[in-house]
Image: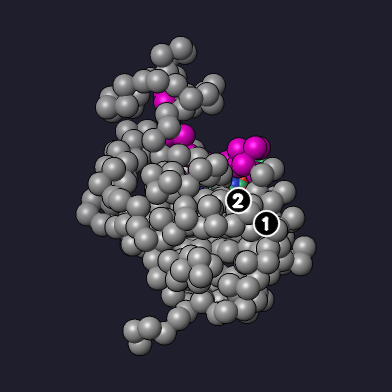
C-alpha cells in the first residue's frame, strides 16, 4: 500500500544510536539499475552458461577468449547502467552517519558513481585489467580478443576475484575488522550464499551488532537476525535516509 513504511522505527533508532555501521551490498542493489544479479538467468548468447561456471580461473585457462567476451558484454551493460535510488541513498547515508563502512561484492563500480567514497570492493572491479601471471594491474589494449600484458606478454584478465581465488587481503582485513566492531550491520541485496562475504553478517551478529537484511526474497540469514526487510533496496534505503534525516 502506498505510504506504508517498510523500515521499522526500531531499526532507525538503532542506526541513529550506532557509533559505527557496516553495510554489505550484493548484486541485488544493482538489479534496479538493470544489471542482472549473479543468479539471474543470463540472457542471449550467455543464456547457456551459469555465471558461477564462467567466473573461475579454470574457465579462463580453458577459453580466455570466451571469458573476455563475457566480461566485455557485462562491462557494456554496466556502462549503460546508472546508479539507482538505492545506491544514491547509501551515498547519502554515508554523510548522515558518523562512521559508515561500505563493503560491496559487486564489481560494477555503481556505488562510486553514486557518490559513495571509500568503497571496499570485496570481489574486485570489472573495469580493472590484471596480468594473469604477475597479478598486477596493467594498462593494455582491452579490445584485443585476449589482451596481453605489456611487461611479460602473458594473458591479461579482468581484475575481479573468481571462485576459488582469495579475497584481496586489504579488503578482507577491512571487512572482518568493521563487521566485528560495528554496532549495526546492513546486508543489502545479497543471497548470502557466497563466502567469505556471506560470513560477515554472522560475525557482526556474534559480536553483538544489530543486524538487518534488505532483500525482497528473505535469505537464510532472515531467521537469525534482528530485522528482515522484504523490500527492494531502492525503496527501503531512501525511506531509511528519509527517517534518519528527520
Ligand atoms: C574463496 C566476482 C578461498 C566475479 C564473485 C566457505 C568459506 C570460504 C570459501 C567458500 C566457502 N564455501 C564455498 C566457498 C567457495 C566459494 C563460494 O562461496 N561458493 C559458493 C557458491 C558456495 N567462495 C570463493 O571461491 C571465494 N574465494 O573463498 O577463496 C581461498 C583462500 C585462500 C587462497 C585461495 C582461495 C571467492 C568468491 C568470489 C567469487 N566472485 N564475483 C564476477 O563478478 O565476475 S561472486 C558473485 O557472487 C558476485 O560478486 C556477487 O555479488 C556474489 C554474491 O552473489 P549476490 O551478490 O548475492 O548476488 P545473487 O545473484 O546471488 O543474489 C542477489 C540477491 O539480490 C538475491 O537474493 C535477490 O533476492 C536480491 N535482490 C534482487 N533484487 C533486489 C534484491 N535485493 C534488494 N533489492 C532489489 N531490488
Residue lying at the far bottom of the rendered structure: 1
Residue lying at the far left of the rendered structure: 44
Residue lying at the far right of the rendered structure: 207
Is the residue marked 1 within 8 Å of ligand 1, measured from its CB?
no
Q: Name above or below for residue 180 compared with residue 163.
A: below
Q: Residue at x 23, y 50 (%)?
A: 45
Label 2 sits on residue: 101
- Number of the label disc, if any, that sits on residue 20: 1
Q: Earlier in the sequence, mark 2 or mark 1?
A: 1
User: Residue 227: x, y in percent?
Assistant: 60, 76
The coloring applied to the image is: one colour
Q: Is residue 244 left or right of residue 72?
A: right
Q: Are marks 2 and 1 in contact (CB under 8 Å)?
A: yes
Q: Residue at x 34, y 84 (%)?
A: 2
Q: Residue at x 46, y 34 (%)?
A: 159
Q: Is residue 174 left or right of residue 244?
A: right
Is 133 part of what is drawn in magenta?
no
Quarter assignment of residue 235: bottom left
Q: Which residues are magenta?
A: 155-172
User: Residue 1: x, y in percent?
Assistant: 35, 87
Q: Name above or below for residue 36 compared with residue 68.
A: below
Alpha-carbon distance for marks 2 and 1?
8 Å
Q: Residues within 10 Å of mark 2 (few under 14, many from 20)?
A: many
Quarter assignment of residue 70: top left
Q: Residue at x 39, y 35 (%)?
A: 127
Residue lying at the far front of the rendered structure: 246
Is the residue marked 2 within 8 Å of ligand 1, measured from its CB?
no
Quarter assignment of residue 96: bottom right
Amino acid at each position: 500500500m502506498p505510504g506504508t513504511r517498510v523500515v521499522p522505527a526500531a531499526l532507525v533508532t538503532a542506526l541513529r544510536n550506532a557509533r559505527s555501521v557496516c553495510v554489505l551490498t550484493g548484486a541485488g542493489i544493482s538489479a534496479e539499475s538493470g544489471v542482472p544479479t549473479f543468479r539471474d538467468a543470463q540472457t542471449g548468447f550467455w543464456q547457456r552458461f551459469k555465471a558461477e561456471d564462467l567466473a573461475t580461473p579454470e574457465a579462463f585457462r580453458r577459453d580466455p577468449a570466451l571469458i573476455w567476451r563475457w566480461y566485455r558484454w557485462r562491462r557494456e551493460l554496466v556502462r549503460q547502467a546508472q546508479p539507482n535510488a538505492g545506491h544514491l541513498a547509501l551515498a547519502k547515508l554515508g554523510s548522515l552517519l558518523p562512521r559508515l563502512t561500505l563493503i560491496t561484492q559487486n564489481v560494477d563500480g555503481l556505488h562510486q558513481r553514486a557518490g559513495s567514497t571509500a568503497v571496499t570492493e570485496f570481489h574486485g572491479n570489472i573495469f580493472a585489467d590484471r596480468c594473469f601471471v604477475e597479478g598486477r594491474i596493467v594498462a593494455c589494449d582491452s579490445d584485443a580478443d585476449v589482451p596481453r600484458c605489456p611487461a611479460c606478454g602473458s594473458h591479461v584478465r579482468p581484475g575481479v576475484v573468481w571462485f576459488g581465488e582469495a579475497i584481496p587481503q586489504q579488503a578482507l582485513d577491512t571487512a572482518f575488522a568493521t563487521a566485528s566492531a560495528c554496532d549495526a550491520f546492513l546486508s543489502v541485496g545479497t543471497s548470502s550464499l557466497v563466502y567469505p562475504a556471506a560470513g560477515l553478517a554472522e560475525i557482526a551478529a556474534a559480536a553483538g551488532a544489530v543486524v538487518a537484511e534488505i532483500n525482497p526474497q528473505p535469505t537464510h540469514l532472515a531467521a537469525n537476525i534482528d530485522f528482515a526487510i522484504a523490500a527492494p533496496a531502492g525503496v527501503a534505503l531512501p525511506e531509511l535516509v528519509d527517517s534518519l534525516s528527520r
